[in-house]
């Protein structure tokens, strides 16, 4: 499903290059549940953003479902992302001036799903995550944990083939965190490929494979 070869990411200032990723090679098969671990600053989130087509590598090749991502136009990459990928951001990325209901509905509108179907999908998510009472609230009226739950619900509402999750339980209490990890596990057994960035050994244990990053490189176990 995913193949990245010799991926580098750096930022230039006038004097020197700051490397975030160095010569990363990675294959992820459809149906895997992969955890990316490593200390802060090791390049985990950058790698996830490249996989999600939200950032581009400075050098190297990325193939997603046999499409060579680096040769696609921005519009084609956006279409590919919208069609197949659900992204759970560490900082929620909810739209401030939309209600919970409207935030959940937005990815469905992008996919041209008709109104009646949108309504039933949003209602399902509100029920599943027990946030029916919050549907008319704005993100600023929610706690961090509630915003995270809405972000997770939004990422899976389109039934994506691939979920990319950046510290998905970071703002949740342990019971909520466990619930989310169990949900990911269930989605994975139903065929969704999942790649999560996590600091938690416990969360990593839900997956089928762990990739360790250190100083922008994949390290052997």
Image (cartoon, rainbow, N blue to C red):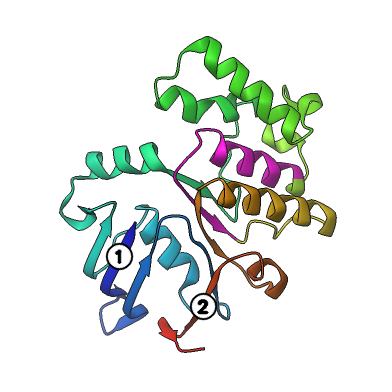
- Between marks 1 and 2, how big is the CA–CA gap? 23 Å
Residue 66: image location, x then y, percent: 23, 53
Q: Which mark is residue 171?
A: none
* Quadrant (top left/top right/bottom left/bottom right) for the N terminus: bottom left
Dot placed on the residue nearer the N-terminal end, 1 or 2: 1
From the viewer's perspective, is 173 left or right of 42? right
The residue that disc 2 covers is 41
Q: Are marks 1 and 2 in contact (CB under 8 Å)?
A: no
Nearer the observer, 53 or 194: 194
Q: Residue furthest top?
A: 116
Give the quadrant of residue 84: top left
Nearer the observer, 202 or 185: 185
Q: Is residue 6 above or below residue 220?
A: above
**Secondary-structure class at tag 1:** strand
Q: Residue at x 38, y 59 (%)?
A: 51
Q: Residue at x 68, y 36 (%)?
A: 139
Q: Is residue 145 magenta?
A: no
Instruction: State the extent of the magenta-drawn residues as a range.
Output: 146-166
The residue that disc 1 covers is 3
């Amino acid at each position: 499903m995913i193949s990245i070869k010799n991926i580098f990411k750096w930022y230039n200032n006038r004097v020197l290059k700051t490397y975030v990723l160095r010569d990363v090679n990675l294959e992820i098969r459809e149906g895997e549940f992969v955890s990316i671990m490593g200390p802060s600053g090791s390049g985990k989130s950058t790698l996830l953003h490249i996989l999600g087509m939200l950032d581009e590598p400075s050098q190297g090749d990325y193939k997603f479902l046999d499409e060579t991502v680096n040769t696609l136009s921005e519009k084609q990459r956006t279409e590919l992302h919208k069609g197949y990928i659900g992204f759970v951001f560490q900082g929620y990325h909810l739209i401030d001036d939309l209600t919970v209901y409207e935030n959940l509905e937005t990815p469905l509108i992008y996919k041209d799903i008709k109104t009646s179907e949108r309504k039933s999908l949003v209602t399902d998510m509100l029920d599943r995550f027990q946030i029916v009472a919050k549907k008319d609230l704005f993100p600023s009226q929610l706690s961090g944990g509630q915003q995270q739950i809405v972000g997770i619900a939004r990422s899976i509402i389109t039934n994506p083939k691939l979920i990319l999750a950046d510290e998905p339980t970071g703002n949740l209490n342990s019971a909520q965190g466990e619930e989310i990890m169990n949900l990911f596990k269930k989605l994975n057994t139903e065929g969704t490929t999942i790649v999560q960035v996590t600091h938690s050994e416990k969360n990593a244990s839900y997956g089928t494979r762990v990739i360790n990053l250190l100083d922008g490189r994949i390290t052997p176990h």
